[in-house]
Each structure stands twice: as structure tokens, then as C-alpha cells.
Image: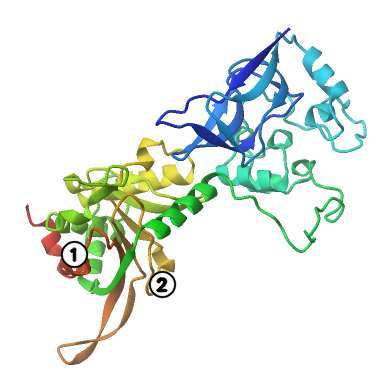
Amino acid sequence: MSEYVFKMPDLGEGTVEAEIVAWHTEPGATVAEDQIIVEVMTDKAAVEVPAPVSGRVVSIRGAPGDKIAVGSPLIVFETGVEGEAAPAAAAAAAPATNKPVAAAVPPGAKAPSASPPPAAARTGRVMTSPANRRRAREAGIDLSSVAGSGPGGRILRSDLNAPTGAPAAAPAPTAALPPDVSAETTEIKVIGVRRVIAERMSEAKRNIPHFAYVEEVDVTELEALRQHLNASPPAGAGGLTYLPLIIAALTRVLESFPQCNVLYDSSRGVLVRHRAVHVGIAAQTPDGLKVPVVRNAQSRTVWELAAEIRRLSERARTNKATRDELMGSTITVTSLGKLGGIASTPVINAPEVAIIGLNKAVDRPVVRQGAVVVRRMMNLSSSFDHRFVDGYDAAAMIQALKEHLEHPATIFIPR
């Protein structure tokens, strides 16, 4: 037997360290090569790290929330373990709460802490959603001990509430509470995607002087066009929402306001103006807000925009979006859909200089040519980096966008 020290790998893009989000193994456990052992987070994306070798875990370094430098020891394996020897040795040496110990209890026997975990024989990755991984992590549940009732043994949310999903629960809520923490409260460590969001939001508000501008738009004609197009969509296409239509209009507007399709390189003190429009779509996911990027939006039809928005949003929600799909936007559009409210103050997605928020579209009475009529109205809430976009130009850009949305035929006039 020999020891193998696995160090934090270089995850690319100039990464010098990574934050541990969740361990999927523990000292004493036996893992197979390519089995997922830990999930880490860089400033760019979440990464699941597989085991480089098969063997028994001797030690691990760092708890969730800790940052480990690239090239520093991460986990130590004992390699050359044969057959059943490693599980037996781990069971003899491991504490009572260690899951491999429970695996050695004969069927039908009464284990002192938990029944034999059905998934003890698993050597591959546990199948479940990112949201369920988070719930299990917060509840202290070892997913390898949970019997999945979904297709192919996939763990569903209901499985986490079943008796087999709670072997790691504490004996009593107040038995091991740290000082100054009552049973009425829960402490949640800010790690992973939520930490990255918090840091970026703080940095954006601290460094960027936001100029906010809200304008109401009559989208009655846009709604009529949307319904007309949805009545006869291309084969295989889904329905259109407002978002692809508004993005199509935005690409037209940015031709006249190129100073809003810009990235600020603070290290060089340079504004990088882009011809192509790469639109970030703020998407709410179980892990927090992510911004997948619709590239070259100016070259896509509204149906192509709609399809790409759906594809990217689904990949972001299921934690399948690649680093490239989450980087490189030049301007962001955010929408809360039916929860859009009356107005909002969106935070700029640095290093961009502009963001546009879509609020809820509602039918309400308005005055048109001296008469009260019912029209569908929507507010556009925008924020601009006031260092580089003057208030006049910001307002003029939103007014131009309003003009296209209130007369949607102009969106499709050839350039």
C-alpha cells in the first residue's frame, strides 16, 4: 500500500484558489477512480472534482467555505487496497457516525444508530438535483446513504424526508448547540454561489455610481404581436414571451447608443466597446442568481432568441451551464416575470455599464387623446454606470427602446 496526495487542481482562467462547497466523501471511506469527491467553487463557476485514483481516504483538508490554494494538498488516499479489506478496516477504525460502519451491520440486525444504507455499494456519483444536494448539505444528510426512488435510483426531494434520508440527524436540537445559538435560530454559512453573488453585488454597489431611470411603456401592440406570432409558431418552437422581443429591440437601439454596450477594464482604465451584443439573462436558480449569455443577439431572429434563452436558462437551473455560457455578456436584461412589481433598481453586472429590468405588464386605465382607455402597461427599470454613461444618454436610450416597443413593426425593419 502507498499514499497518494491529491492537490487542488488548476481549474483554468487564472484561478489561484477554490472554495470548498461540499465534500462527497470522508476519511475512512473507499472511493473509486473518477468518483466525485468534492465540489468546489471558483470566481467563475462550480466544479465537481473526481477522484484521480481508487483507494481509501486517509484525510481531507478544509471544510465547506474554506479556500484552498491551487497546488495545495486537498485529500490523501491510501492506494493498493484490495477487495473487501478496505471497508472492513474502515468499519473497525471509524467512529459510530461514519456511514461505512453502518454498511457492515448484517441484514435484519438492529444497528445502534441507523439502518444499513441502501446505497452503500455505490461507487459512482449520487444522482440528484443541485437543490437536493444543497438541502442535504444543510441538513447534514449523507446522500450516499439515501435510497433514491426516482428513475435509475435518482434521489428526489421526498426521499430526503424519508427515514432512510435522516441517519445523520442530531439526537436533539439543543444537545450540541454552540454558545449564543438558540434552538429558535439556524446559522447558514455563506459559501459557494451565494458567496460569489454577495461579493459581486457588494463590489458593484461599492465601486459603481448607479444612475437609475424608470420609464413606463405601452406594450399593447407588442402583446398583440406576441399573441399573433404564438398562434402560428415555426415547427418545434416554443411560445414567445416579452423577453426575446425586447432583446431584439434592444439590439436595434444599441446601434445608436454604443456607449451602453461596453465593458470597463478597471485594471487598464479602458472602456472596451463591442459591436456584437452579448446579452446576459439574469436567471433565478436553486443555487442563486446566474447570468447565462445569449451571444450575438443582433444576428438572431426572435424565435432563435427565444430558443436560446430557454436553453441557457434550463442549463443554469440544472447547474449544467459551462463557464463560457456564464461569461462575456456586454449588457444584461433581468426580469422577474409575474413577480416583476411596479419598479426595481437592478444592480449592474460589472464590468458592464448598463442593465435593464422588466417589470410586470398589467392592464390599466390610461388617458389617450382625451379619453380613458384600457392599455397594457409595463415599466422598464434601468441602471447605468454614471461614470461613463451620462444621465441624458441613459434616458435617451430608454426612450428609443420605448419607441420600438410601442411600435413593434420597427423592430423588424431591415437595417
Badge 1, how many Cα within 10 Å: few under 14, some, many 20+? some
Picture quarter with the N terminus: top right
Badge 2 element? loop
Q: Residue at x 66, y 53 (%)?
A: 188
Decide which of 138, 16 is in the foreground and name it. Answer: 16
User: Residue 257: percent from the left, percent from the top?
Assistant: 15, 58
Looking at the rendering, which quadrant does residue 125 occupy?
Answer: top right
Residue behind mark 1:
397
Vertical position of residue 260 compared to residue 50: above or below:
below
The Cα–Cα distance between marks 2 and 1, rounded to whole angstroms, is 22 Å
Q: Residue furthest left?
A: 414
User: Residue 237: percent from the left, percent from the top?
Assistant: 29, 48
Residue behind mark 2:
341
Instruction: Check whether the beta carbons of the residues at disc 2 and disc 1 lie within 8 A of each other.
Output: no
Residue 183 horizontal side relative to residue 345, left or right = right
Task: Give the mark nearest the N terminus, 2 or 1.
Answer: 2
Badge 1 element? helix
Q: Amino acid at mark 2?
A: Gly
Q: Is residue 224 visible?
A: yes
